[in-house]
Amino acid sequence: MTQRLHLTVAFLLVAGQTAFAAPCQFEAQGEGRVAGIVDARSVRLDDGREVRLTGIEATATTRQALTTLLVGRDVTLRSTDDTPDRYGRQGALLFVGESETSVQAMLLAQGNALVSAEIPDKDCAAALTSSEAEARRQKKGNWADPSAIKNAESPDDILAGIGRFMVVEGKVLSVRQAGAMTYLNFGRNWTRGFAVIISKRTVPAFENAGMPLKSLESRRLRVRGWVEGTAGPRIDVLRVGQIELLGANEPIGVRP
């Protein structure tokens, strides 16, 4: 009886640890010591491997923050896949020593990076988004600059950042479909106003997330992505996580 009780307690402890495990604790894909910083999103380990930090996009302060956090430190690489990208870089979340908080989450909490919404795991993506939101609320790092969030009503300001990853907030004035593309228009002038483009193959993901595209009309959104366009700025949305719904009465530019 005593042995059975011990086994039951042990099972409950393990189950509890699993249920409350920290997010982003994917399978370990190797370890190493950081020898140097390649760029604002990549580091080189002392064995020559190059690692790309997944889940974030860089700001002006990311590289310096990475240098402070990582150079000379032992790290664990965690991800669902260790296949290198076309440049030979291994994509991963990095963890320093025995820490259960990823380097990406640390950067986001400092306001030294932006969530890229490229991680499909919902719990991990939510944790990273929460870290960014807290930094935004406290106006830390990048968020101390009022222009860190672009207003969709000022398309010229967005267009000035063409080729850059940006966060834009605004109200969707209309939702229009043209061929295989759906356009969320934030301006009345479709050719010059800011718009979000969503391909037909991405539409089911929005429907499964309870966000049918037509329902976004007249809603206030926060959108993140790479700015493209010539006459008017555009962001191609490839993942549901690139769009956040804002409160109905929340003024554009407020950092929750």
Image (cartoon, rainbow, N blue to C red):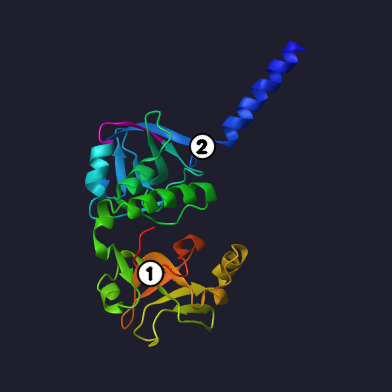
Q: Is residue 37 visible?
A: no
Separation of marks 2 and 1 at Cα, in angstroms: 41 Å
Counting from the top left corner in percent of width and height, residue 214 is at 56, 77
Counting from the top left corner in percent of width and height, residue 32 is at 35, 32
Magenta-highlighted residues = 70-76
User: Is 210 drawn above or below residue 103 in the view shown?
Assistant: below
- Front in this rendered view, residue 138 or 47: 138
Q: Which mark is residue 27?
A: 2
24 to the left or right of 31? right
24 to the left or right of 15? left
User: Is 196 drawn above or below residue 134 in the view shown?
Assistant: below
Task: Name the image quarter holding the C terminus.
Answer: bottom left
Q: Secondary structure at mark 2?
A: loop
Going by the numbered disc 1, the residue's amino acid type is Pro
Mark 1, other Cα within 10 Å: few <14 / some 14–19 / many ≥20: few
The part of the image, by quadrant, that contains residue 95 is top left
Residue situated furthest front in the rendering: 249
**Residue named by callout 1:** 251
Residue situated furthest right in the rendering: 1
Disc with the residue nearer the chain's start (2 vs 1): 2
User: Is 223 drawn above or below residue 185 in the view shown?
Assistant: above
- Front in this rendered view, residue 67 or 187: 187
- Front in this rendered view, residue 37 or 7: 7
Counting from the top left corner in percent of width and height, residue 164 is at 30, 65
Going by the numbered disc 2, the residue's amino acid type is Glu
Foreground disc of the pair 2, 1: 1
Counting from the top left corner in percent of width and height, residue 119 is at 47, 52
